[in-house]
Image: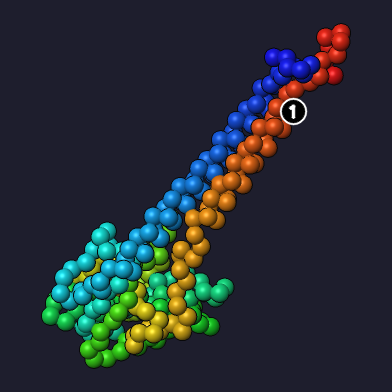
Amino acid sequence: MTIAGYEFRPRLVPTLAYVVVLALLLGLGFWQLERAEQKREALAARAAAARAPVLELNRAPASLAEHRYRRARASGRYDGEHQFLLDNQVRDGEAGYRVLTPLRLEGSTGAVLVDRGWVPVGPDRSQLPAIPAPDGARTVSGRIARGPVVALRLGEPAAENRSWPRRIQYLDFDYIAHALPYPVEGYLLRETPEGEGAVAARAPRDAWRFGPERHEGYAVQWFALAAALTLIWIGVNSHRQREDGKQT
């Protein structure tokens, strides 16, 4: 193909490399657009949940699928003998645990798992921190949450299958339900930082601390790199023709 005195003749190896890298760049760009849409939907869901009435968990059951982000309130007693410490939770560069304590619901045989906040690992990782739960009847206010997730689960959530508090590597509600001697709901009630049972002085970081615009900006960067790569590929495979028909 000859255009304005330039002959475009793509070579095999550069073209194969171009196609592979272009596909990668475009894939990253569209992935960021998908993340932006997910963020937009989640923010809309949180805004709707903030306007909705507070759920009274002692009166009616809730579900993660239907009530995620909703404000909720539950009354009962903490089961301080059966607490879970979710490992590998980092705050400001410091390793720690999220403290998950069952709240036995008043007037029910079941419980909800309360995320009471973050505590540091401490100087000796072999020794789990002692975290007492408040005694007596309590009313806990917070939001219904899914909790931290991991991309890859290797083995059982907990190596110490008989000791309490129990250190778990990832959140698995089926495992937690089998570990407790009573039914437990399949979601977290993330307690507000000022709650009576909260153990963290700092509120948990918000997973949605920036909006969809940042993801859209990342997408533009990936697409710009794809465009630049295309121009480079065209330039590498284009040659000016001399008057005698030879390439220069």
Between 199 and 37, the one nearer to me in the picture: 37
On screen, residue 112 above or below 199? above
The quarter in which the C terminus is drawn is top right
Question: Residue 182 or 210: which is nearer the viewer?
Answer: 210
**Residue 156 % position (x, y):** 35, 62
Q: Compared with residue 160, is residue 216 higher up or lower down, i.e. above or below? A: above
Res. 19 image quadrant: top right
Q: Quadrant of residue 226?
A: top right
Q: Left or right: where does residue 112 sit relative to residue 170?
A: left
Q: Where is residue 142 in the image (x, y as percent from the top left)?
A: 32, 76
Q: Position of residue 194 (x, y in %)?
A: 39, 85
Task: Name the residue: 49% across, 59% down.
Answer: 211
Residue 201 vertical placement versus 229 (above, below):
below
Res. 77 visible in picture: yes
Q: What residue type is labelled 1?
A: Gly
- Hey, which quadrant is residue 238 in on the image? top right
For the N terminus, the quadrant is top right
Residue furthest to the front in view is 51
What secondary structure is found at the residue carrying circle 1? helix
The residue at which mark 1 appears reads as 235
